[in-house]
Image (cartoon, rainbow, N blue to C red):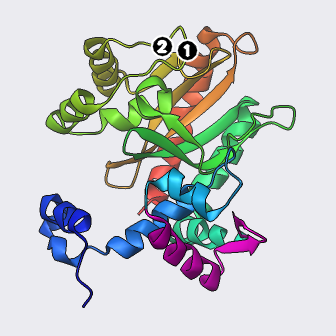
C-alpha cells in the first residue's frame, strides 16, 4: 500500500467520519477526484492542468493523475490543453434523482404547484450551508438564469433554507450558526446571528418561512416543510416571484395554503 504524504497523513489523523468509521478507510484519491470535478463551473467551463491545480490547491502531479483517471472514465474530455466536463457527469445526478422520491413524487409536485399558482416552485434539501434544488418548475414566461436542479442557495437567507435549518436539533443549529461566516447577498439580508437564529426557530411554530429580497433583491418567496409519511422533514417546497408580480399578502395567504395542501397530499407517497 502506498505511503501517504505528510499532509494527507495529518488530515487523516484529524478527520472524524460519520458513524464512527475508521479514518484509515477514507480514500484521499477519491476525494481529490471529486474536488477536481467540482472545480468546473459556469465561470470555469474549461481549464488547463495548471488552472485546475490552482483551483483545487493540489500539486501538478496529483492533479494530472486525477484528470487522467476522469478522462479515462469518461467524465472529462481533453481538447488540446483544455479539460472540460462531459455529459456523463449527469449520470451522477441521475443516480440521485432516480434513487430518491424526486423523480416520481417531488418533480410532479412542483409542476402541479407551478400550474396552480403560476409561480416558480422548487424543492430543496440541505447540504452544509446551502439549500440545493432537487426539483423545479417555472411558468413559461419566467426564466431565472441558472436556477434549476442542482442550483445552490444560501440557506440562512432563503425561505427554503430556513425551513430546512429549522428541522435541525437545537445544538446542531447553534453549532452551525457559530461556524458560519455570514455574508449578506443583498442590502436587505439579515446579518445579525441572533436574529437569524430567531427567524429560523420561528419557522417551527409558524410552519413556513417568508423571505423578501434577502437572497436576491428582486425576489420574494415562501416555503413549507416537505414531510414523509412518518412526519420526518426531508426537504422544503417553495413558491417564488419577482417583487411586484405577486404581493406578500397573496404569498402568505392563498399561495401558502396551496403549498400546505400539496405537501400534505404528497406525504403518504414519500417513504
Is 224 situated above or below 36? above
Q: Quadrant of residue 218?
A: top right
Residue 27 in percent (x, y) is at 31, 75
Could you tell me which secondary element the residue under label 2 belongs to? loop
Find the distance from the CA under tag 2 to the CA under tag 1: 5 Å
257, 155: nearer the viewer: 155
Secondary structure at numbered mark 1: loop
Left or right, 224 with respect to 255, comes to left
> Left of 163 or right of it: where is 123?
right
Q: Which residue is mark 2?
A: 189
The reply to whether callout 2 and callout 1 are in contact (CB within 8 Å) is: yes
Residue, disc 1:
186
Residue 63 belongs to the span the image colors magenta: yes
* Quarter of the image where one finds residue 32: bottom left
Along the viewing direction, whichever of 182 and 264 lies nearer the viewer? 182
244, 218: nearer the viewer: 218
Rendered residue at 40%/74% (across/down): 30
Q: Residue furthest bottom?
A: 1
Residue depicted at x 60% and y 9%: 249
Q: Is residue 191 magenta?
A: no
What residue span does the magenta drawing correspond to?
A: 59-86
Quick one: which residue is furthest to the right in this view?
Answer: 141
Residue drawn 28% across and 16% down? Answer: 193
Amino acid at each position: 500500500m502506498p505511503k501517504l504524504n505528510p499532509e494527507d497523513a495529518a488530515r487523516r489523523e484529524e478527520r472524524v467520519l460519520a458513524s464512527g468509521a475508521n479514518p484509515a478507510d477514507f480514500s484521499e484519491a477519491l476525494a481529490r477526484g471529486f474536488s477536481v470535478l467540482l472545480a468546473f463551473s459556469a465561470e470555469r467551463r474549461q481549464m488547463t492542468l495548471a488552472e485546475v491545480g490552482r483551483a483545487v490547491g493540489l500539486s501538478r502531479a496529483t492533479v494530472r493523475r486525477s484528470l487522467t483517471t476522469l478522462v479515462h472514465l469518461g467524465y472529462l474530455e481533453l481538447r488540446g490543453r483544455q479539460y472540460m466536463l462531459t455529459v456523463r457527469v449527469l449520470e451522477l445526478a441521475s443516480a440521485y434523482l432516480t434513487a430518491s422520491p424526486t423523480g416520481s413524487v417531488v418533480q410532479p409536485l412542483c409542476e402541479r404547484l407551478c400550474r396552480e399558482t403560476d409561480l416558480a416552485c422548487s424543492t430543496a434539501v440541505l447540504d452544509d450551508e446551502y439549500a440545493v434544488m432537487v426539483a423545479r418548475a417555472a411558468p413559461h414566461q419566467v426564466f431565472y438564469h441558472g436556477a434549476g436542479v442542482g442550483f445552490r442557495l444560501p440557506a440562512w437567507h432563503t425561505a427554503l433554507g430556513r425551513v430546512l435549518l429549522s428541522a435541525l436539533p437545537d445544538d446542531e443549529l447553534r453549532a452551525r450558526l457559530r461556524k458560519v461566516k455570514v455574508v449578506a447577498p443583498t442590502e436587505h439580508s439579515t446579518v445579525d446571528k441572533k436574529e437569524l437564529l430567531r427567524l429560523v426557530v420561528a419557522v417551527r411554530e409558524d410552519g413556513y418561512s417568508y423571505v423578501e429580497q434577502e437572497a436576491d433583491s428582486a425576489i420574494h418567496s415562501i416555503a413549507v416543510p416537505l414531510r414523509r409519511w412518518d412526519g420526518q422533514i426531508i426537504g422544503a417546497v417553495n413558491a417564488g416571484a419577482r417583487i411586484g408580480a405577486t404581493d406578500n399578502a397573496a404569498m402568505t395567504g392563498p399561495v401558502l395554503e396551496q403549498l400546505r395542501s400539496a405537501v400534505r397530499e404528497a406525504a403518504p407517497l414519500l417513504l
